[in-house]
Amino acid sequence: MIEIVAPGPYATVQDLGRPGYAHLGVPRSGAADAPSLRLANRLVGNPESAAGIELTFGGAVLRFGVNAWIALAGAPCPVEAGRRPAGMCAPVWVPQGGTVNVGAPREGLRTYVAVRGGIAVEPVLGSRSTDSLSGLGPPVLRAGTVLPVGDAGPQAAIRVDSAVQGPFSPGPSVRVVLGPRADWFAPDAADTLRAGPYEVATETNRVGVRLRGAALERAREGEIPSEGMPLGAVQVPPDGRPIVFLADHPTTGGYPVIGVVAARDVPLVAQLRPGDRLWFRPVPGRGVRT
Amino acid sequence: MTIRRAGEHALLVETGSPAVAHRLDALLRADRPAHVEEIVPGQETVLVVAPDADQERLESRLAGLLASAAAAGPREDEAGAAAGTVEIPVVYDGEDLESVAALTGLGADDVIALHAGSEFVVGWLGFAPGFAYLLGLDPRLHVPRLDAPRTSVPPGSVAIAGPYSAVYPSASPGGWRLLGRTDLRVWDVAADPPAKLPPGTRVRFVP
């Protein structure tokens, strides 16, 4: 088991979420930056879908009650395992009784800790993820929380010494597929969105990233009859300041969605800190080439 | 009726009515196209999320299904039959019964009679897991939400707001007006399915 000595500013257990229940009002949830969790899992020979720990702005101390292989990916933090410096994106051996200290990230926001065998809290609706919107899944991690580690069993051997991940830009360019409700906005709204930049507001969490910047003017007033919301939806409330929906976003909503962030760019948005900026690159609704 | 792109991986089908949305939902669930991860009815829409599907092929498939769903007209009967009917026993002793009576100019007994006499259908879910927006509330009971929402509404609370009624599936903050309560659990993560009131379900409240 792993004891959370200190969780840092905000930490939860996350896997790849609970898809398939959106029609019952259940958010997908799961790692906000899923590729980073997948990478951390691969590095310790786990299935990519295994549950790990999602740290927000690092700052965690974990004590291991078992021998463990771990790997960290996502926002790069200084890491010490048993008082020795350890690297990001590499399998790290932690002996029973060892402590892992994770500092604050140099860039990016969310860091993933995978442990060989996975975090083995009880799944809810097929997932071990904490859904911050609905409260499903295990509670948010606190000092003293103890997390069971699963049995690695016959799973894949650890075959990689380290991996490389791209930089976490504090000012990324983010592709947005316009629609489904771009027609609810003034004709120049796409240009306003493109001109940017937008700055990440402090009221930002796993549900969504609130942005400050030029307001997007509406062509129609009122609310849309509630409709399903996809991951990465750029929803625009009446004040005209867009919100980008992340993993714990509500399943339905009544504010118009001017566009949806391209799937590959959602993790970039999930790694933005309050105060970071982003530039939207609107592309027409007929698909994105990646 | 239109099919709109909702990003790279989803299509939003406009159905023009809840009944057609429910019928399309039922058709999609009965014969789910490959790679479809989520089918999310809204009030007059169905969002279909399919990250690994060929979106153009999915779009033409949806267009065909939408035509079949629309051909039956805007009646709710068949869709309701597919999703079933649920009777919800209610004790009408809600804290807001009197304020609803005052707002509507009706007596508390009339409020209860109109609510229990309404034929509801689950439009869609949202706000919280298992929270079903029930369509079909008698127009005489359309009242605004509370000015200040309650910080905690107990699970099983039967409430109304605007043109909707609902049963709170779990304890949560809430601004709807409480008419009563039920012991029926509309949300249970251990049950399969966990929600008792999926879209299209017909609902009657029984005093």
Image: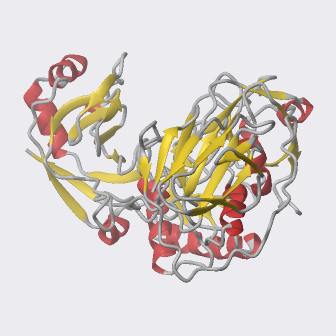
User: Residue B179 occupies which quadrant of the picture?
Assistant: top left
User: Residue A11 occupies which quadrant of the picture?
Assistant: top right
Residue A221 placed where, x, y %? 64, 28
> In the image, is A100 to the left or to the right of A197?
left
Judge by depth and name the residue closer to the eye, A63 or B123.
A63
Residue at horizontal 74%, vertical 30%? A219
Judge by depth and name the residue closer to the eye, A112 or B167.
A112
Judge by depth and name the residue closer to the eye, B72 or B205.
B205
- Can you say whether B162 is above or below A99 in the image? above
Q: Quadrant of the C terminus of chain A?
A: bottom right
Can I make out residue B15 in this image? no
Q: Quadrant of the N terminus of chain A?
A: bottom left
> In the image, is B195 to the left or to the right of A286?
left
Can I make out residue A15 in this image? yes
Residue at horizontal 25%, vertical 53%? B186
Residue B160 placed where, x, y %? 28, 34
Residue at horizontal 50%, vertical 65%? A20
Q: How is the image coloured?
A: secondary structure
Residue B141 placed where, x, y %? 26, 31
- Can you say whether A238 is above or below A43 in the image? above
- Can you say whether B101 is above or below A87 in the image? above
What number of labels is visible?
0
Judge by depth and name the residue closer to the eye, A275 or A281.
A275
> In the image, is B59 to the left or to the right of B43?
right
Residue A15 placed where, x, y %? 56, 59
